Amino acid sequence: MSEPLPSTVTIYEVGPRDGLQNEAAIVPVEAKAEFVRRLVAAGLPIVEATSFVHPTWVPQLADAAELMTMLGGAGKAMPVLVPNERGLDRALELGLEHIAIFGSATETFARKNLNRGLDDQFAMFEPTVTRARAAGLDVRAYVSMCFGDPWEGAVPIDQVVSVGKRLFDLGASQLSIGDTIGVGTVGHVKELIAGFDAAGMAPDHLAMHFHDTYGQALANAYSALEEGITTFDASAGGLGGCPYARSATGNLATEDLVWMLNGLGIETGVDLDAVVATSVWMAELLGRPSPSAVVRALAQSPA
């Protein structure tokens, strides 16, 4: 039988980085800074601001250093994604305190996203994590394609667990399990969490990162809650995707997750109305409606 649901949940907001990275039209850096500030003001405890990725790979995030400078002292506590040691150098120069690395559970995606083989990625990440920890930075590790890969199909659970644990054991404080193309199901979520548990990784070491491609993100989040997961990645307004996997559509919307958690009596500290207003503002800036069902419903509700 599943354990009682947790009383509190931490939402790890990825909208400014994972949400915007796939947008073709460049969002002005001033708007990105305003987006981050609004999300923080709405009570989101962690807001991942950007990525120090090479601008050739993700042009949308070419202004990462400018954004973090614009955010000032508050920005130093916000996580940023770093793909390698060069990215870490930029984070250290700015005095940032939290970084994340982004690995793959599959060979094909590792080559497409990292230009490394499945095993080679660990050699690339090891010096980055070692240097970051020596400098006193917190490190989060993402592992992508944990539930399925558009090129390889189903991904064996033992393979995901092996890759995830190796990434975590480099020196990360948390491992985010990514359903990059949104094919996960309730049963699959439970099996994967059980696999990590059997490998010595308890739920408090894990976060879940769901995409809503098949409309399963909320169901999968509830399934993970039942297994003791208390950190969930989400993106304001359901923005997001992956520039290296076309079948990776929007992230689990922050508002949809908060609505469900509110209904369960689970505390998040997040002001739902404020996040909705922020997502409506961003949707207007992007020139299209928010994909979040809760944003659409609340934005159309009579005052």
Image: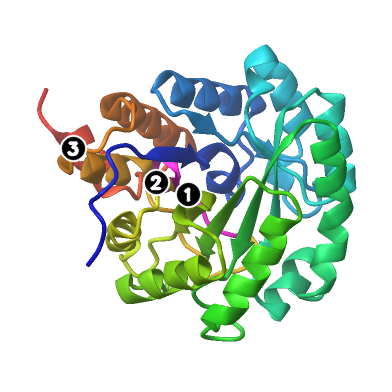
Nearer the camera: disc 1 or disc 2: 1
Q: Earlier in the sequence, mark 3 or mark 2?
A: 2
Structural distance between the alpha carbons of marks 3 and 2: 14 Å
Structural distance between the alpha carbons of marks 1 and 2: 7 Å
> Are circles 3 and 2 on residues that touch, CB within 8 Å?
no
Quadrant position of the N terminus in the picture: bottom left
> Are circles 1 and 2 on residues that touch, CB within 8 Å?
yes
Q: In the rendered structure, which amino acid carries the disc numbered 2?
A: Thr
On screen, residue 296 versus residue 228, left or right, reads left
Q: Earlier in the sequence, mark 1 or mark 2?
A: 1
Indicate the quadrant where residue 194 lies.
bottom left
Q: Residue at x 39, y 52 (%)?
A: 229
* Residue at disc 3, secondary structure: loop
Q: Residue at x 24, y 38 (%)?
A: 266
Q: In the rendered structure, which amino acid carries the disc numbered 1?
A: Asp
Q: Residue at x 51, y 54 (%)?
A: 206
Structural distance between the alpha carbons of marks 1 and 3: 20 Å
* Residue at disc 2, secondary structure: loop
Q: Residues within 10 Å of mark 1 (few under 14, many from 20)?
A: few
What residue did someone put label 1 on? 204
The segment highlighted magenta reads: 232-242
Q: Where residue 198 sits in the image (x, y, percent)?
A: 50, 71
What residue did someone put label 2 on? 230
What residue did someone put label 3 on? 265
